[in-house]
Image (cartoon, grey):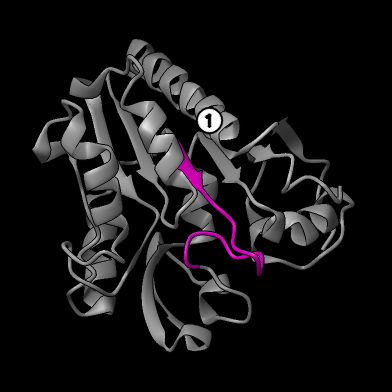
Amino acid sequence: MKVPALNLHVFADAQAAAFAAAQAVAEAARQAVRSRGSFHVALSGGSTPKLMYAALKALDLPWAQTHIYFSDERTVGPDDEQSNYHSAKVGLLDLVPVPGAQIHRMEGERDPAQAAIDYAALLPEQLDLVLLGMGDDGHTASLFPGTAGLSGAGRVIANEVPQHRTWRLTFTFSEINAARERLLLVTGAGKAPVLAQLANGTGDYPVARVQSPVWYVDEAAAALG
């Protein structure tokens, strides 16, 4: 799959990349509130966002006007350490003054198909920003290589992921690409082979289907590009 040249921002290490990404989120929030009165952002899962959460809680965001969503979730309860919501809660949401009624988690403990339908129904007309990561296999959100979700319709789906013997709740590519902005935070040497192929316009990886993202990466991830 041929992809356009990447809008790539490279930083010395993961912490620097995460801090810069957090600053971009803060600026997007302030602009959204100035322009539309509220900020609707979808957080991502995985381990990489934890550094960004640490930076975000120290920045000046309009938390009272911020609405939090999630781009994907594991089929676990909200108190499970594998839950993307739980990670965001303990790393960020419990530490900033965002109103609880404005935090919208995916209910991973429920039937995935019904939970996906219900989550799609509560999303705003358009998200301001979707935060994403990338796995070593080139997946983003819970859109893994070879899974049916790659061609999923609608806004939110239940995606079977055989390689992990589980189901996931996830935004579709149409939902991701409908947002006003997309930000990819990618760190670590394990991401370098995929990122190098994407930078060269090659590699049929799921993440290549994200339209016009801004990439925040560390030198380890960009080492082969």
Image location of residue 160, percent across then percent down: 43, 83
**Hey, which residue is sitting farthest right in the picture?**
200
Does 223 lie within the magenta span?
A: no
Percent x, y of residue 8: 74, 35
Observer-nearest of 178 and 193: 193
Q: Is residue 1 above or below residue 144?
A: above
Return the residue nearer the eye: 84 or 104: 84
Q: Quadrant of residue 59?
A: top left
Does 31 sit above or below residue 83? above
Q: Secondary structure at mark 1?
A: helix
Asked whether, in this view, residue 76 is left or right of residue 25, the answer is left
Q: Is residue 93 left or right of residue 100?
A: right
Amino acid beneath label 1: Ala
* 17 to 131, vertically: above or below: above
- Give coordinates of residue 93: x percent, y percent: 22, 38
Residue located 76% across and 60% down the image = 194
In the image, residue 134 lies in the stretch drawn in magenta: yes
Give the extent of the magenta segment. Answer: 129-142
Q: Residue at x 49, y 49 (%)?
A: 48
Residue drawn at x 56%, y 73% is: 144
Please name the residue that numbered disc 1 is placed on: 21
Quadrant assignment for the N terminus: bottom right
